[in-house]
Amino acid sequence: MQVIKVKNLSVRAGDAVVLDGIDFDVQEGDYVGIAGPNGAGKTTLVKTIIGLLPKRTGTVEIFERRTGKGFKYHGIGYLPQRPQAYNPLFPATVEEVVLTGLLADKHFPKKITSKDRDKLAHVLELVDMALLRRRPVSQLSGGQQQRVFLARALASDPRLLILDEPSTALDPHSRQEFYGLISRLNKDMKVTILLITHDTADIGLYANKLLYLDKEIIYYGSFADFCRSEKMRDYFGGHQHIICHQHKE
Amino acid sequence: MELLNYLQYGFVIKALIAGSFIAVLCSVLGILLVLRNMSMIGDGLSHMSFGAISLGMLLGVYPFFVAVPVVIAASWLIWRITDKIKAYGDSAIGIVSAVGIAGGVILASLSGGFNVDLFSYLFGSILSISQSELFITVFLSTVILTMFLILYHDLVAVTMDEEYAKISGIPAGRINSMLFILTAVTVVMATKAVGIMLVSSLLVIPAVSSLQLSRGFKMAFALSAFFSVVSVVFGIILSLLLDLPSGASIVAMNIIILFSTVIIKKTEIL
């Protein structure tokens, strides 16, 4: 099944071109790493896919249905770059944050049921945060906060999980654990992953596809082909990118 | 004993009932506004309320009926300016606030200058609340609190993370406009209790006091409502016992609670 199909997508901010001529598709079970320099349009790309930013041209299909006005973004988990709840003055507890992830499937008037409580317990177990469920999120470490927002993204049983630089606030050990958890979701639960990262040195160890972006797609495909690609050689001026030294194939 | 004597008077009971309803309303909406960095919206709307009340007096219409639609429109305007021209930040509140005050002063001078009625709205006169004003306050407060409870999860989700709320299918735009309408009606009602000059204190201070000690959203709402009701009840009692203005006494109680919560937080007593 095609999870994402993007055709001729372009995005502008005023007169500036942010993304141009973007074409790619993501299949069910894929783990796609999105890399590129600062200002390449990585966050803009995922925000446009999930309807948070307007597109200038092109079409986006998710789960084989075209997005647009009235499109319901069910089945998608999203871990933003800097969730607002990182604000140290925000009083939400771990379970209050995760419960907002369950609202997607609810109808008016929204109520939290005992089934939701079971689901909450399950996702908190999954990210190893069950013991801290009543703790204010602002009192947690960067790694623990990241797990809380991952639990929120997982609460609605997503078939597609989009993560925007999830490892920024993590130490090397927490980063490895976090990537391990995402890999298990991908392999064991067949969740399709789209992950924006600056960890180009590590992404090849986990993802099976790479999308290298710099306002347009420089490369999209497997890691092995990336290192043999002429486009990549042209772009990096003949030097092999660090990704080529790290990927698993 | 003197206090018990006061409780025999109908105007005191009416003031305590109306004040408590307004206190709960302001305090729960205040949490949402403070967490969205929109603490000053109460100030802007109450100033617009001043303009609308002056207009009502000039036209000879009951001021409340003019103030509610005008302040809702002002609230919508603040939201649209802030949403569409993000770079202007809280300047939208400043613009609406200035228009309200300037309009109010012009209209007041056209209707023969400031009179006792207008002063009662400027500084609050909850002890003079009429039977019909009490009825309107209790009725509207019940409607607004019911809507708050029905929309609780959506309001919290949008306040916590608007982007995530949007992809969760929550109509963030509609929820925001609903919050601003509820705030506008609440501000107009609170004008009678503490006056135009002090209305934003009822929205902001109990919320800030509560956020000093809260360990979760639900606790924040509950503590804010508790602090607000305590400040209104004790503020009214203080004003009766010491013959002080009721609006300013309510704000003074709020300030005492705020300082207490800050000290409790700093010293980690709880």
Image (cartoon, coloured by chain):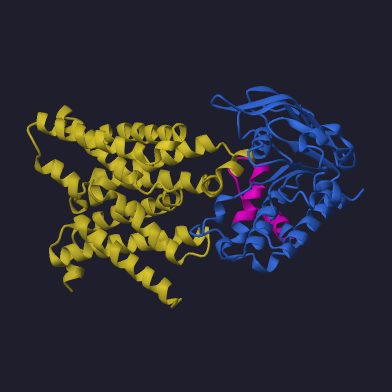
Chain that appears yellow: B
In the rendered structure, the colour chosen for chain A is: blue
Question: Which residue extends farthest left?
Answer: B112
Residue B53 seen in the current view: no
Residue at x 45%, y 76% (from the top left corner): B268
- Residues shaded magenta: A97-122
Quadrant including the N terminus of chain A:
top right
A113 magenta-colored:
yes
**Closest to the observer: B194 or A67?**
A67
> Residue B110: which quarter of the image?
top left
Residue at x 77%, y 60% (from the top left corner): A176
Residue B172, above or below B32: above
**Closest to the observer: B144 or A43?**
A43
Residue at x 37%, y 73% (from the top left corner): B263
> Residue B269: which quarter of the image?
bottom left
The image shows residue A186 at horizontal and vertical percentages of 83, 49
Residue A226, above or below A131: above
Question: Which residue extends farthest right?
Answer: A249
Residue B261, above or below A21: below
Lateral position of residue B251 relative to residue A27, left or right: left
Lateral position of residue A11 relative to residue B269, left or right: right
Residue at x 38%, y 62% (from the top left corner): B209
The image shows residue B84 at horizontal and vertical percentages of 46, 31
The image shows residue B85 at horizontal and vertical percentages of 44, 32
A40 magenta-colored:
no
The image shows residue A184 at horizontal and vertical percentages of 84, 54
